[in-house]
Amino acid sequence: MTEEFEPKIVAFLCKWCSSAGSDLAGVSRMEYPANVIPIQVMCSGSVSPLYIFEAFNRGADGVLVSGCHPGDCHYIKGNMYARRKLLLVKKLLEHVGLEPQRFRMSWVSAAEGQKYTQVIKELVKELKPLGPQTKLRRERNG
């Protein structure tokens, strides 16, 4: 009997909105897959493309960057800078042969625990048929 593939997702979550939205989902006992490794960042605009590539290099099957809704960023335009920067990252990931479904950006506010759960469910659903990500994964010694 083979075990069903469960993707490992690294999520870079804005401290002020998306991370609080994930907390709301948790304290409200909303059900969603436990596939996410959350990393709180001050702003989605502070997520370096290198962080995304390193997450894939370390074995992530998918990466999510989630921040405040446009116009609601605590750092004025940080999320808009993130959107521009991460669209280029997505194109670069596709250029190196990674499926575009493996990377996603979302806008989730602190009051949107339900939306956070939906984003995770959709990402897991898209990743399962793709199987493990092996194109950027590097071998670990020791």
Image (spheres, rainbow, N blue to C red):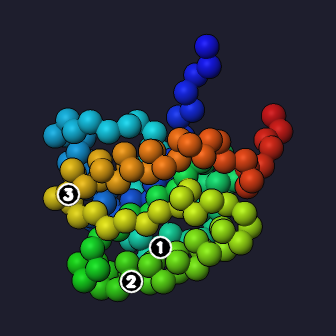
Residue drawn at 30 percent across, 50 percent down: 118
Badge 1 local density, few (<14 within 10 Å), some, or many (20+)? some
Q: Any mark on residue 80, and which?
A: 2
Q: Which residue lies furthest to the right in this view?
A: 141
Q: Which of 68 and 117 is in front in this view?
A: 117
Q: Which of 30 and 21 is in front in this view?
A: 30
Q: Any mark on residue 112, and which?
A: 3
Q: What residue type is disc 1 on?
A: Ser
Q: Distance between the residues labelled 2 and 1?
A: 11 Å
Q: Element type at marker 2?
A: helix
Q: Quadrant of residue 33?
A: top left
Q: Is residue 88 visible?
A: yes
Q: Nearer the viewer, residue 106 or 52?
A: 106
Q: What residue type is disc 2 on?
A: Met
Residue 117 vs residue 85: left or right?
A: left
Q: Element type at marker 3?
A: loop
The residue to which callout 1 is attached is 46
